Image: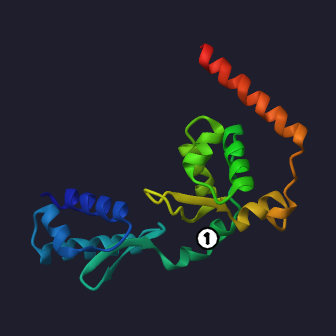
């Protein structure tokens, strides 16, 4: 394999893997011996270190890894501390409400209440850090149980779940009527 192509292949592998990769494995992929592969990686490291970019290649016990240069850490810390903005659609908010009031709760129980799949909403809520897995239900298949997090409390400005507004009997009846109407509309369609 041509040297420039080998560098491109190694760069793609190290970038994608995100962890150290043994030189033997890298050598196999570019069809070179370990010594030549290590030389190519050393050249690449020097090129990265001499460039004005934010990446470098490090060697860890016979394996190589692409990582951020040390002088970039302060910027990484800034971005990590910047609050993430997330969009809570009606579907995600509805799912979050069910979890907040019924926790711990399984996906199946959420779907039974909502009447539709909740995989996307649950995955987004986990990604946003608003809910987390809190255990497993002692039932066949041992389904995951979900509950809210401290981030949920912070985001909604409450100190505990007890501060969540209580639903009145009238509101519960209205929700039941809306759900029944939605079910009859979907059945008639």
- Residue 14 is left or right of residue 142, and the answer is left
Q: Determine the residue positioned at 57% across, 42% down.
A: 118
Position of the C terminus, as image quadrant, is: top right
x and y, in percent, of residue 9 in the image: 24, 58
Q: Quadrant of residue 114?
A: top right
Q: Is residue 129 visible?
A: no
Please determine whether, in this image, residue 8 is positioned above or below residue 32.
above
Determine the residue located farthest toward the front in the rendered image: 139
x and y, in percent, of residue 150 in the image: 72, 68
Please determine whether, in this image, residue 152 is positioned above or below residue 124.
below
Location of mark 1 (residue): 75
- Residue 167 is left or right of residue 5, and the answer is right
Q: Nearer the viewer, residue 178 or 138?
A: 138
x and y, in percent, of residue 18 in the image: 38, 67
- Residue 65 is left or right of residue 2, and the answer is right
Q: Determine the residue positioned at 38% across, 70% down.
A: 48
Q: Is residue 171 visible?
A: yes
Q: Nearer the viewer, residue 120 or 66?
A: 120
Q: Quadrant of residue 10?
A: bottom left
Mark 1, secondary structure of its residue: helix
């Amino acid at each position: 394999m041509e040297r420039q192509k080998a560098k491109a292949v190694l760069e793609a592998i190290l970038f994608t893997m995100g962890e150290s990769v043994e030189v033997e494995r890298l050598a196999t992929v570019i069809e070179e011996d370990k010594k030549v592969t290590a030389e190519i990686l050393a050249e690449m490291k020097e090129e990265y270190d001499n460039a004005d970019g934010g990446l470098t290649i490090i060697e860890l016990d016979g394996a190589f890894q692409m990582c951020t240069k040390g002088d970039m850490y302060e910027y990484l810390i800034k971005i990590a501390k910047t609050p993430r903005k997330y969009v809570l659609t009606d579907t995600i908010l509805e799912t979050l409400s069910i979890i907040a009031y019924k926790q711990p709760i399984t996906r199946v129980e959420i779907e039974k209440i909502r009447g539709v799949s909740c995989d996307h909403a649950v995955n987004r809520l986990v990604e946003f850090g608003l809910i987390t897995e809190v255990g497993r239900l002692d039932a066949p298949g041992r389904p995951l149980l979900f509950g809210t997090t401290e981030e949920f409390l912070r985001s909604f400005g409450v100190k505990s779940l007890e501060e969540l507004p209580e639903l009145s009997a009238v509101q519960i009846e209205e929700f039941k009527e809306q759900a029944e109407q939605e079910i009859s509309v979907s059945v008639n369609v």
